[in-house]
Amino acid sequence: MRKKVAFYTLGCKLNYSETSTIGRLFNQAGFDTVEFTAQPDVYVINTCSVTDHADRKCRKLVKEALKHSPDAYVVIVGCYAQLKPAEISEIPGVDMVLGAAEKFRITEHLTELVKRPKALVLNGPIHEAIHFNASYSMNDRTRTFLKVQDGCDYSCTFCTIPLARGSSRSDSIENIITRARSIAAEGVKEIVLTGVNIGDFGIRNGKREERFFDLVKALDEVEGIDRIRISSIEPNLLSNEIIEFVAQSNRFVPHFHIPLQSGSDKILGLMRRRYRKDLFEGRVAAIKTLMPDCCIGVDVITGFPGETREDFLETYDFLNGLDISYLHVFTYSERENTIAAQMEGSVPGSHRSDRSKMLHILSDKKRRAFYEKNLGKKYDVIFEMEHKDGIMHGFTQNYVKVRARYDPLAVNEVRHVTLTAIAADGNVEVEEAAEIFVH
């Protein structure tokens, strides 16, 4: 009988693309992929370390896994596995821990599924993670997360990603175009470009050979893909030529996610970010000048060491004044082996929490204002395969989320709608049918 494997992914779009690729490796090795609760022979948990509580989340998932399949072989991969393999190996029930350079050889390491008293740890130093492992998700026919870049050469004082994923490296444009055409042949309508620092695309074997803008231009020529969406891109790497190209592109959509982290130049300096807020403000202005309806998401960290109330209010006021659409708010947490963890001026936990709440409220305000601005306008929506309680969801080009009564004929289809009104519950109704509205 064929063995069964189940997966659980924590963290970013990049992790999802890699989990999907690892899943295909298991399928090629003779395993069937099943749901988490379907008593698999192997569990693979892909971990994240960007936020705190990685240990707690991992322990809980292992415990839950063994409730469903007590004899299952449990493998931990991902950023947390690279950073703290010894800590993970002590979690009861864990059988194998694979680092960044080993996770894509996972099926080679599973020569026998025998649970032993001590977990097997295969975790080389991060400088050995020099190869780019191509990945993309194929969880449904609507959207694919396509990995184009991995690792980071930046040295932000709060971040462990370079320690978890290594130096910046990329696939070639030629390989990515070939992969994008294969994805299009599967009927996928939208590709989301993902990586650790995708604006730094083009480094292979330690040398820059290509540029992200060249990749953007090449992907715009791929037939069969309706939409291409750029995930998070650093503001200093989001050039005017990229903004101008997206504005006139038929495939790249008007949606950017740009990490700010702080609206205080003082804090940006302590973070070792490679820009200041005037550059960020200029990027937002350039986007909105060419694409007034563009959705702009922003990452922000609050509670960084040395952040006074005045620094926080400077960030709040800066964000409040920007024409942006939503925030991803991160409450700063100390990470081992980072410079920030040793800095003076630690912000009390209660202050971090209060500031985070203020930013979440601001995000809600920004999102509602963005929805209101789009009322009366026509957009194309691509509906996704997943549905629950008779409801399906989809997104406009500029990342407005719409929901409708489930219709199997509408899955992965483009529907033209007009956004008409914001309902009492905050949803936005559209013209095409009374049951379709933005979530």
Image (cartoon, helix red, strand yellow):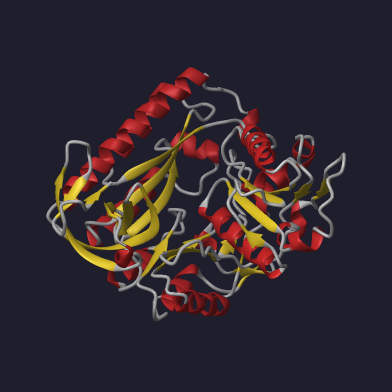
User: Residue 234, relative to residue 88: is it above or below?
Assistant: below
Q: Observer-nearest residue: 277 or 397?
A: 397
Does the image show residue 278? yes
Give the quarter of the image for residue 147.
Answer: bottom right
Write the residue at 84% across / 50% down: 114
- Residue 67 placement (x, y as % from top left): 67, 37
Q: Count the marks: how many?
A: 0
Say left or right for 85 vs 181: right
Q: Position of residue 118 (x, y in %)?
A: 86, 40
Residue 344 higher or lower than 222, as above or below: above
Return the residue found at the far right: 117
Left or right, 28 with reference to 10: right
Q: Nearer the viewer, residue 246 or 12?
A: 12
> What residue is shown at x 28% (from left), y 68% (from top)?
414
Q: Picture quarter containing residue 356?
A: top left
| Residue sitting at x 23%, y 56% | 293
Residue 196 can be seen in this image: no
Residue 237: x and y in percent read 46, 59
Picture coordinates of residue 268 (x, y %)?
48, 39
Left/right of residue 332 with respect to residue 426 in the rendered view: right
Question: Vertically, is 219 above or below 141?
Answer: below
Q: Quadrant of the N terminus?
A: bottom right
Q: Quadrant of residue 152?
A: bottom right
Relative to 103, is 39 above or below? above
Q: Residue at x 81, y 59 (%)?
A: 109
